[in-house]
Amino acid sequence: MNDIDKLIQIMGRLPGLGPRSARRAVLHLLKKRETLLHPLIESLGDVAAHVKTCGICGNLDAADPCAICRDAGRDTSQLCVVADVGDLWALERIGTFKGRYQVLGGVLSALDGIGPEQLAIAPLLRRLEGGEVKEVILALGATVDGQTTGHYLADRLQPMGVAVSRLAHGVPVGGELDYLDDGTLIQALKARQKL
Amino acid sequence: MNDIDKLIQIMGRLPGLGPRSARRAVLHLLKKRETLLHPLIESLGDVAAHVKTCGICGNLDAADPCAICRDAGRDTSQLCVVADVGDLWALERIGTFKGRYQVLGGVLSALDGIGPEQLAIAPLLRRLEGGEVKEVILALGATVDGQTTGHYLADRLQPMGVAVSRLAHGVPVGGELDYLDDGTLIQALKARQKL
């Protein structure tokens, strides 16, 4: 296989790029060598060399512990549990949560054979032993596996004397009732808020 | 900007990847360091170091002249004119054309200010001077700019004593008449073939 075909094959393994779009991307890179190909190689090299997994929370950052775990300004009494680093980034983008995180590295899944040992549940429980954390916020997806994981964690956490909460379900901002699935509508009605 | 954000920003400039999918791709790369990130860096480096533009036809290849121009088994009497290297690759995938290529590097566009000087038309005309090429096949897109470029090239090529043809318009294989645009249907009817 020649260099170009090999690169197309590797690029095609990225999420969101199929064989056709990988080919387009490679062609684009070859057309913009100075402005895109070389900066991309350099940037990938930087990331490969510097980015590591935070030993405390599981975040990806240039330093270990990560910037969030090192930030003394953040509230150590709130711990937000997320499945993936991408979820942590999503919460950081909204910028309203000022506590710390624990990345589980996935959710429980009978189908994929992912049990509690495969997730960072032991590190989560260890972080609660100090007694500094008062509230654990379960920010897991509203999928079957996400909810199962939430229930499992709630059962494990409740005896430890911390408050456990989960993200609210409801109508997405900008959403039309008419297009909403029944499950969401039921949850939104149940959790209706006083005005 | 940290290493990860910088990489997301660069990846987001690839065609087919927006900011959100670039983020997903970077996260995926960081999860699969050994099997994806490192091979990608190596492969990009290989392509950057070895792939060059063929001095004869404009194709991208590890060698100059490219494998197609060097291949003595290919028919030198047929020259296929394409706008872009991606179009050349598309034709090579079907594998039925056994002649050589000329990549124009785009199509004429009054809107984008692309005139004949910006395209590889002079090299194309020089290649015809030897008299070896008997037929020029214009494999340009069926867009307004593609067709304009085709007409312009036909005018320039006809006095040189070569046969000039273009790709057939018609019903795409697997296409339903009902869903076809009028222009294509008109062309398909005009160019109807005897059975």
Image (tube, coloured by chain):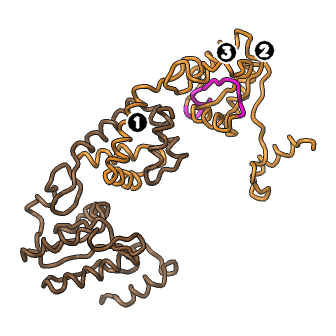
Chain colours: A orange, B brown
Disc 2 target residue: A159
Quarter holding residue B78: bottom left
Give the quarter of the image for residue A40: top left
User: Which span is picked out in magenta?
Assistant: A96-112
For image coordinates 31% across by 87% down, the residue present is: B193
Q: Chain of mark 3?
A: A
Q: Are marks 1 and 3 on the same chain?
A: yes
Q: Chain of mark 1?
A: A
Looking at the image, is mark 3 or mark 2 earlier in the sequence?
3
Q: Residues within 10 Å of mark 3 (few under 14, many from 20)?
A: some
How far from the left and from the top, in percent, is residue B185? 44, 85
* Mark in front: 2 vs 1: 1
**Which mark identifies residue A43?**
1
| Residue in the image at 19% along x and 77% along y | B136
Alpha carbon distance from label 1 to label 3: 36 Å
Q: Write the residue at 32% across / 45% down.
A: A7
Task: Specify the amino acid type for callout 3.
Answer: Leu
Q: Quadrant of residue A69?
A: top right
Residue nearer the viewer, B130 or A152: B130
Q: Secondary structure at mark 3?
A: helix
Residue at point 24% right, 85% down?
B155
- Nearer the observer: mark 1 or 3; the answer is 1
Q: Mark 3 or mark 2: which is in front?
A: 3
Q: Earlier in the sequence, mark 1 or mark 3?
A: 1
Inspect the image, locate mark 1, and give the three-letter code of the amino acid beneath it. Answer: Ser
Task: Determine crowd level at label 2: few under 14, some 14-19, many 20+ residues with C-alpha closer than 10 A.
Answer: few
Between residues B161 and A167, which one lies in front from this camera angle? B161
* A110 within the magenta span: yes
Total of numbered circles in the picture? 3
Q: Residue at label 3?
A: A125
